[in-house]
Image: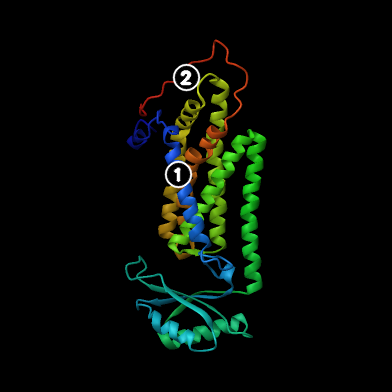
Amino acid sequence: MSNWWPLIKIVPIQTNFKFVKYAKPMAVLSIIAVIGSLYLALTPFSPPCGGLNCGVDFTGGVLIEVDTGQTPVDLAAAREALSDTQGRQDVQVQNYGTSSDPSGRYHAMVRFQPPQGVAGPVAVDQAEAALQAALGENIQFTRQEVVGPKVSGELFVGGIVALLVAIGLMMLYIWFRFEWQFGLGAVVGLFHDVILVFGLFAVTKMEFTLTAVAAVLTVIGYSMNDTVVVFDRLRENLRKYKRMPLRDVIDLSINETLSRTIITGVTALMALTALALLGGETLFGFSVALIFGIIFGTYSSIYVGVPIILLWGVKRGAAADDDEPEPVKLGMASRP
């Protein structure tokens, strides 16, 4: 394939980048990004989601999506119709479609807390009637969701538990397969990626739902997979080059796996970009979270997980024999 597809030549077979050289400034950048993401995701300190734009899954209430066709959504009229009747609380009306969309249709998302003592289905019927009176009889309702406060609380706790269990299992896996320094680096990298994804949701105000939790879990799996590939090559090189300084072994290991990392990441990003553009509003947040999660995961494998091994050191085994192989001299040769 490389003989007739010239794009493959863009990715060099061998590289000789000095990643460890920039480990300290990258560590400072990572710390600032993590602290900023935590601040944005947690403030204001109000349950259940702090600074995240939690969906009905976690806050409870009613969600209705409205399709007004070729007519722009009158957000003020819709908000007034829902706020002034039936005792609804926390009414939110957001426009997320314009005539520039491929479908050429306008959409709006309505969320509110139903009145006390009113069942969810009844609250939906009342809200739809009020919206039709305000926006016209020709509007369509494409989505209706009702989640009670008890169920939303259980879903929120379940989502957090799922994230913590996933990280714990990944830590055990690394601990059994490698040394504890590797496990520590992997766990720090996972927390780095997860916190930055939460920060992404806080900055963009994308709706944080159970679908977003699924995206975070997927990011954890991808990040760990990429980290294990680098760690495995690092372990092999530590056994092979026992005289080589640790920082040089780390650079060598990352360079040897860089081509595979780039190709795998770009392939995933191409599929996710198509999903974000064509998958609709429901899958947009999921796709964007995965796109940035893959970027964060690739970065953390190079500048978060591995540098921690350099910080704590690692056992190199017995002294090297005189016939220890010479380190590979890497260059910038491209694919033929």
Residue under the image location 33 percent in, 71 percent down: 99
Which circle marks residue 28 in the picture?
A: 1
Q: Position of residue 34 (x, y in %)?
A: 49, 51
Residue 29 shows in this picture: yes
Q: Are marks 2 and 1 in contact (CB under 8 Å)?
A: no
Secondary structure state at the residue bearing disc 2: loop
Q: Position of residue 223 (x, y in %)?
A: 53, 44
- Specify the quadrant of the image occupied by residue 151: bottom right
Identify which residue, 80 or 5, lies in the foreground: 80
Look at the picture and state if 260 lies above or below 240: below
Mark 1 burial class by Cα count in 10 Å: few <14, some 14-19, many 20+: few
Q: Position of residue 330 (x, y in %)?
A: 41, 24
- Specify the quadrant of the image occupied by residue 162: bottom right
- Mark 2 or mark 1: which comes first in sequence? 1
The span from disc 2 to disc 1 (Cα, nearest Å) is 31 Å
Residue under the image location 63 percent in, 83 percent down: 119
In the rendered image, the quadrant that contains the N terminus is top left
Look at the picture and state if 233 lies above or below 185: above
Q: Position of residue 92 (x, y in %)?
A: 47, 76
Residue under the image location 53 percent in, 32 percent down: 310
Left/right of residue 178 with respect to residue 201 in the rendered view: right
Residue under the image location 54 percent in, 88 percent down: 86
- Residue tagged by mark 2? 327
In the rendered image, the quadrant that contains the C terminus is top left
Q: Amino acid at mark 2?
A: Pro
Look at the picture and state if 246 lies above or below 84: above
Q: Amino acid at mark 1?
A: Val
Secondary structure state at the residue bearing disc 1: helix
Look at the picture and state if 147 lies above or below 229: below
Residue 136 shows in this picture: no
